[in-house]
Image (cartoon, rainbow, N blue to C red):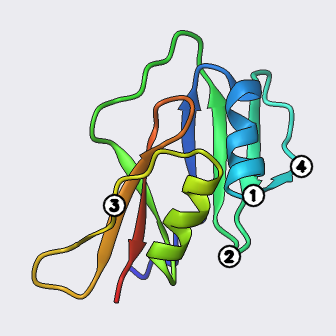
Amino acid sequence: MELGTVHHVSINVADVEGTAPFYTDVLGMEVLDRPDFGFNGRWLRTSGGAEVHLIEVENWEPPKGQHWAFRVEDINATVGKLREKGVKVRDPKPLPGTSAKQTFFFDPAGNMIELNQPY
């Protein structure tokens, strides 16, 4: 079996309308057309082509520890831009035994997001 890159991640949120602007205005994702599935949601895409699908789930609460990661070329510059936009981001830390760095932050719904500079 040969798997390609991840096409999209589907993220549950309690309020799509309240969460989507974080992904578009802060992270710079574009809104994609989305079929009517009979429940509220939003399909978004990064400039690199990765998609995040927000799914509204009533009374949803984020699980602890679960996260997904975006690869970045310059983690320090990305952290700086996020902080300029008011996002609380942890200082980047090296991954032991590698040259990679990572950091974490949360979207307004409480979903944990990682930034990963793999080299």
Q: Say which quarter of the image contains residue 16.
A: top right
Real-space Cα separation, disc 1 to disc 4, in angstroms: 13 Å
Q: Is residue 5 above or below residue 10?
A: below
What amino acid type is highlighted by mark number 4?
A: Asp
In the rendered structure, find residue 57 and report the number of the disc placed on it: none
Left-right relation of 109 to 51: left
Task: Choose the circle earlier in sequence order: 3 or 4.
Answer: 4
Q: Is residue 55 visible?
A: yes
- Mark 3 crowd level (few <14, some 14–19, many ≥20, 10 Å Cα): some
Please tell me which of labels 1 and 2 falls first in the chain.
1
Rendered residue at 33%/60% (across/down): 91
Tag 3 secondary structure: loop
Q: Residue 30, position in %: x, y? A: 82, 57
- Residue bearing the label numbered 1: 29
Residue type of the residue flagged with mark 2: Gly
Q: Cβ–Cβ below 8 Å for labels 1 and 3?
A: no
**Viewer-proximal residue among 77 and 60:** 77
Crowding near the residue tagged with mark 4, few <14, some 14–19, many ≥20 C-alpha atoms within 10 Å: few
User: Considering only vertical position in the picture, is 43 above or below 60?
Assistant: below
The correct choice, above or below, for 15 with respect to 83 in the image is above
Q: Which mark is residue 48?
A: 2
Q: Mark 1: which secondary structure?
A: loop
According to the picture, the residue beneath numbered tag 3 turns out to be 91
Question: What's the residue at 64%, 66% (across, down)?
Answer: 50
Q: Earlier in the sequence, mark 4 or mark 2?
A: 4
